[in-house]
Amino acid sequence: MLESMLEKAVDMFRYAWVRNTRGSARWVLVSQWGVPGSDADRAVAALARLRFPLYVDGDGGVVVRAIELSRELPHDVYDCFLVALAEKGEATHLVTTDAGLRRVCERVGIRYENPIPRKVLAQFGPTGRRSS
């Protein structure tokens, strides 16, 4: 019975996470990046159809690894923590819109994937705001 309750709780969390992520993604696509609503809807629908991600436990070893990466590169420890989690989970790719993670991913042998087309990225400066 406890196992069934835990499974339901995990499913509810997954639903809430996917729902929140989809809403945020659509808002960024339309409001910040000027993507037409219908195109944003198609992109978000594709995201929703993806198989749910694997959860990796962020234990002390991951924290230590993140600090090591942060010192070696140098790069902020939060970004390094995300890459250390991916490394622990034996990820081959990390999909993110954070261009700063490219160098960290390269350092650990994880392929960095930015889903935003380069043509679109070129329109934005370091702050993430559209260039005038």
Image (cartoon, rainbow, N blue to C red):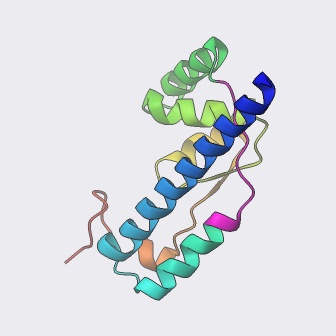
Q: Residue at x 56, y 26 (%)?
A: 69
Task: Locate the N terminus and report the quarter of the image it occupies.
Answer: top right
The relative height of residue 95 versus residue 28 in the rendered view (above or below) is above
Identify the magenta region.
48-57
* Residue 76, percent from left and from top: 42, 31
Task: Kindly identify the residue that appears in the image at 43 percent across and 77 percent down.
Answer: 120
- Count all numbered tags in the image, as a single digit: 0
- Residue 121 position in % (x across, y down): 43, 71
52 shown above or below 72? below
**Residue 2 appears in the figure:** yes
Name the spot of residue 89 as percent of width and height, x first.
75, 34
* Residue 73 horizontal side relative to residue 4, left or right: left
* Residue depicted at x 62% and y 46%: 14
Residue 20 part of the magenta-drawn span:
no
Residue 108, visible in the rendered structure: no
Q: Quadrant of the C terminus?
A: bottom left
Q: Nearer the viewer, residue 107 or 55?
A: 55
Does residue 46 sit above or below 126 in this rendering?
below
Q: Nearer the viewer, residue 9 or 25?
A: 9
Rendered location of residue 44, percent (x, y): 55, 71
Q: Nearer the viewer, residue 105 or 128?
A: 128
Going by the image, does 126 lie left or right of 6? Answer: left
- Residue at the (61%, 37%) spot, across then down: 83
